[in-house]
Image (cartoon, rainbow, N blue to C red):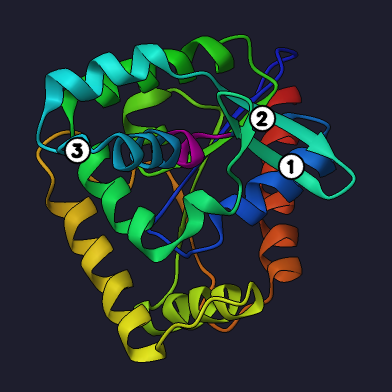
Amino acid sequence: MTDKQPIIAIDGPSGAGKSTLSKLLARELGLVNIDTGAMYRCVALAAARRGIDPEDHARLGQLCGELRIDFCRSAAGERVLLDGEDVSLAIRTPEISLLTSRVAASPAVRQALVGLQQTLGRAGGVVLEGRDIGTVVFPRADAKFFLMASAEERGRRRFDELRARGVEVDLAQTIAEVRARDEADSDREHAPLLQAADAVVIDSTGKGIDAVLAEMLQIIEERTACARS
């Protein structure tokens, strides 16, 4: 890395801990966190509310131009706003999670949001997480991570998260939905979930968030030291 503020890319499947770790990493390093996954979830939520067919790519592309997506930090943490409405919880339901994978496969949606992500992150000083940050959005990112965990563990994490919010869910069904999301993300034609060849792979199965964060910080510190030498 150079004196320019870094661009850090975090990719991986749903439930691998990308959102949590990108926020923590950004806070530790004094960088800006850009939750790209939340952007796609916002489009999916808006499409569901307006009754837009996820196969109607033209209408989805038009929808992207009509939406305002903002991120703000409050005492309660980072919040996601869709046209001024706090949708931080609404975009995390199982239904929206599955719909997001279909909406994100639309070339029109990806073109619109990738362009926005590149604009937001081009100057550096950012952490971005998603499924194609290191391969499509910023293939020349200064540091790339690919987070993974077993489908069973990711399903349990999602199950616990939803139950904590008061959502009645079934563990077996939640794990099945995680596997279905993996398949949809990996098999889609446009920008599928792929591991960048130069990404550092971290399997978080059986590991706590603090341990994974420490591992990522150490890797970034080592790369920074090498660049300075």
**Residue 153 percent coordinates (x, y):** 46, 82
The residue at the point 26 percent across, 72 percent down is 179
Q: Which mark is residue 105?
A: 3
Query: Which residues are drawn in magenta?
Result: 35-39
The reply, left or right, for residue 135 in relation to residue 117 is: left
Q: Is residue 139 visible?
A: no
The residue at the point 48 percent across, 49 percent down is 91
**N-term-proximal mark, 3 vs 2:** 2
Give the amino acid type for the residue marked by disc 2 in the picture. Answer: Phe
Cα–Cα span, label 3 and label 1: 26 Å
Q: Which mark is residue 78?
A: 1
The reply, left or right, for residue 209 in relation to residue 95 is: right
**N-term-proximal mark, 2 vs 1:** 2
The reply, left or right, for residue 183 in relation to residue 222 is: left
Which residue is nearer to you in this view: 85 or 180?
A: 85
**Location of residue 73 by image quarter:** top right
**Residue 208 percent coordinates (x, y):** 68, 76
Residue at image mark 2: 71
Q: Which image quarter is the N terminus in?
A: top right
The residue at the point 42 percent across, 42 percent down is 41
Q: Is residue 100 visible?
A: yes
**N-term-proximal mark, 3 vs 1:** 1
Q: Which mark is residue 139?
A: none
Label 3's element? loop
Give the amino acid type for the residue marked by disc 1 in the picture. Answer: Glu
Cα–Cα span, label 2 and label 1: 7 Å
**Is there a contact, CB below 8 Å, between mark 2 and mark 1?**
yes
Q: Which image quarter is the C terminus in?
A: top right
